Amino acid sequence: LSLILGFAAAAAATDTINWRSYEEGMVLSKVEKKKVFLHFYADWCGFCRKMANTTFKDSSLINFLNDNFMPIMVNTDREPQTAGNYGVSGLPTTVFLTERGEPIVTVPGYIATDPLMSMLKEINGLKTGG
């Protein structure tokens, strides 16, 4: 029974993005030498909820993001200073950073699964000297 439960737990772990806090994720990205996927949202934001309920539920995207990036989610109402540091003026906003925390590109607005997967693959292939 414990073997079955162990497999179930392992399978469930890949069903969600391994979101980190800003502080933890920025440290881990340097340690693990992973580019950063920094997603800004707010609870009241309709397109943020849409992205959470559609884009961020796709198993292929979840696995690729978890394997190749350091996913960080920041609530702009709770961390307005962090959002301000990245010039966030609308939600959702996604910022890609190098392993050293240097900006690669900022993408404002809702991103559907297929376009986001294309962006992730392209940015993952960039040589950023991390």
Image (cartoon, rainbow, N blue to C red):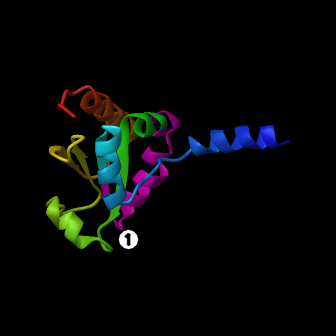
Residue placed most toward the observer, 69 or 108: 69
Residue positioned 35% across, 39% down in the render = 32
Residue positioned 44% across, 40% down in the render = 66
Q: x, y (%) of residue 105?
A: 17, 43
Farthest residue toward the right? Answer: 1
Residue type (three-letter) at the residue carrying disc 1? Trp
Residue positioned 32% across, 29% down in the render = 121
Judge whether residue 7 is colored magenta. Answer: no
Q: Main secondary structure of the magenta part?
A: helix
- Image position of 59 with respect to 81: above or below: above
The residue to which callout 1 is attached is 44
Q: Residues within 10 Å of mark 1 (few under 14, many from 20)?
A: few
**Quadrant assignment, res 113:** top left
Q: Quadrant of the N terminus?
A: top right
Numbered range of the magenta stretch: 39-62
Q: Count of labels shown?
A: 1
Q: x, y (%) of residue 27?
A: 31, 52
**Quadrant assignment, res 70:** top left
